[in-house]
Amino acid sequence: MRGITRIRQMIENNVNVVIGQDCIEDPWYPLGTGDPLDALFMAVHAEPLMTPELLNYSLNMVTFNAARAFGIKNYGYSNGDQGDFIITESKNPVEFLQFRSPRIVIRKGKIIKGDRNE
C-alpha cells in the first residue's frame, strides 16, 4: 500500500505540483490507461482537493504545471503557441473532472483520441 504526498501543502508553498502516471496495463497497476485525468481524479479524492478553488486549480497539475516541469516553452493558448488541445462539452473545470466527458484530443493538428461523431 502506498500513501499520497501532501499535495495541498505543496500548492500552498508554491511547489510546481504535477500529477501523472506511466502505468498502462502493466503488472504493477493493471488498471492504468495512461490518461492523466484518471490519475488526477484519484488524487483529488485521496488528498482531498474538494474546494472549488482547488478543483479549478487541479487541472493545472496535468497541463500548465506539467509543461513547466518538462521545460516546454510557449505552452498555453496565445498566438504562436503549440497547438495541442482538447475539445470537451463540459461547462467548467469542475464538471470536466466530475464527468471526464467525451473529448477530442488534438496533437500536432491530428485527432489522436475521440471522434466528432461519438
Image (cartoon, grey):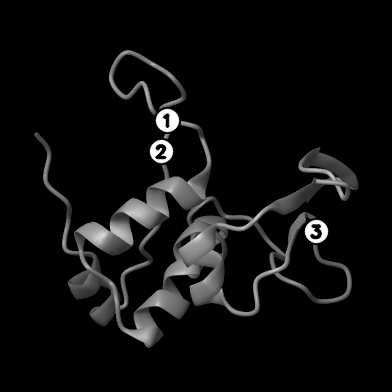
- Crowding near the residue tagged with mark 2, few <14, some 14–19, many ≥20 C-alpha atoms within 10 Å: some
**CB-based contact (under 8 Å), mark 2 and mark 1:** yes
Label 3 belongs to which residue? Answer: 82
Residue 20 is labelled as: none
Q: Is residue 32 in view from this perspective? A: yes
Q: Rate crowding at label 3 as few (under 14), some (14 to 19) or many (20 or more) other CA atoms within 10 Å.
A: some
Which quadrant would the N terminus be assigned to in this image?
top left
Q: Quadrant of residue 43?
A: bottom left
* CA gap, disc 3 and disc 1: 27 Å
Where residue 32 is drawn, which disc sits there? 1
Q: CA distance from mark 2 to mark 1?
A: 8 Å
Identify which amino acid the numbered label 1 is placed on. Answer: Gly
Give the residue at mark 2. 21
Q: Residue at 88% across / 68% down in the picture?
A: 80
> Residue lying furthest front in this view?
118
- Residue lying at 39% horizontally and 47% vertically, measured from the top left: 39
